[in-house]
Image: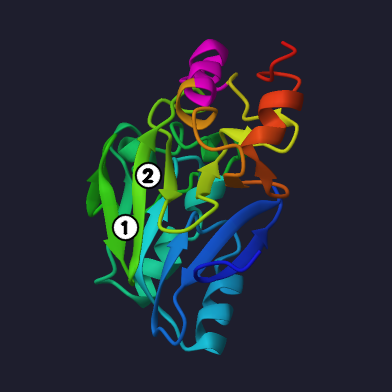
Amino acid sequence: MKLPFQLKVIVSQPFGENTYVIFTEDASECLVIDPGLEPELILDYLDEEQLEPAAILNTHGHSDHIGGNAALKERWPECPLVIGAGDASKLTDPRGNLSANYGLALVSPPADRLLHEGDVFEAAGIELAVLETPGHSAGHIVLVYKQSQPWLVFGGDVLFQGSIGRSDFPDGDFDTLSRSIRDKLFTMPDDTIVLPGHGSPTQIGFEKEHNPFVGRGV
């Protein structure tokens, strides 16, 4: 499938978290989605491609998805940091973003812009629709690119290939997560591609049929 933009996946350890860098052909600006715990990998790639982020987007506020925020903001202090309103407090709260559990006490700069259900975020020539998808975290969002077929979902830790996000964190809930998936994601076209926060891409139609947690057989 030919994507409507350039897409680079940068995997950060120790949690195998996917950072997505997206940019249109011949662009000098990009979007960075969920910069992980190895920001030097992201910075090296941006330098190699001569790209500057027009926005840093977080699907949610857990430490493995915000770990690179500070390094990117230090390099580009005017670049807006964007997150769903319900998870904004996690950026500066090590307990809320779960880093305190690992003895890291990681914090991010605060958000410059908050997103809500139904918003459309546009930067670097790319337009993303915002859906609130709580359950893994209370303020989790997904970002949907609808300007081509199939649609693309930057899904964070909601729906994985053959699995779903954890719901046993302090503000997680399995029933809420299941509703988010069924009401928000499973209503999308079957060929919609989900680009998850961990692991390989998947498609909505496949997960509707086969996902052992929320599929039709459950």
Which quadrant would the C terminus be assigned to in this image? top right
Question: Closer to the camera: disc 2 or disc 1?
Answer: 1
Residue drawn 63% across the image and 64% down it: 9
Q: What residue type is labelled 1?
A: Leu
Around disc 1, counting alpha carbons within 10 Å, would you say few (fewer than 14), some (14 to 19), or many (20 or more)?
A: many
Q: Which colour scheme is used?
A: rainbow
Q: Does the rendering let one see residue 196?
A: no
- Asked whether 171 falls inside the magenta stretch, the response is yes
Q: Which amino acid does label 2 sit on?
A: Leu
How many discs mark residues in the rendered view? 2
Q: Which of 137 and 3 is in front in this view?
A: 3
Residue drawn 55% across the image and 52% down it: 150
In the rendered image, the vertical position of residue 124 relative to residue 28, given as above or below: above
The kind of secondary structure element at disc 1 is strand
Answer left or right for 5 relative to 29.
Answer: right
Answer left or right for 17 relative to 53.
Answer: right
Circles 2 and 1, Cβ within 8 Å, touching? The answer is yes
Which residue is the site of mark 1? 81
Which residue is the site of mark 2? 91
Give the distance between the C-alpha atoms of the residues marked 2 and 1, in whole angstroms: 10 Å
- Asked whether 132 falls inside the magenta stretch, the response is no
Chief secondary structure of the magenta span? helix
Residue 139 image position (x, y, % from top left): 38, 31
- In terms of image quadrants, where is residue 124? bottom left
Magenta residues span 169-182
Q: Which of 175 and 206 is in front in this view?
A: 206
The kind of secondary structure element at disc 2 is helix
Q: Does the rendering let one see residue 146?
A: yes
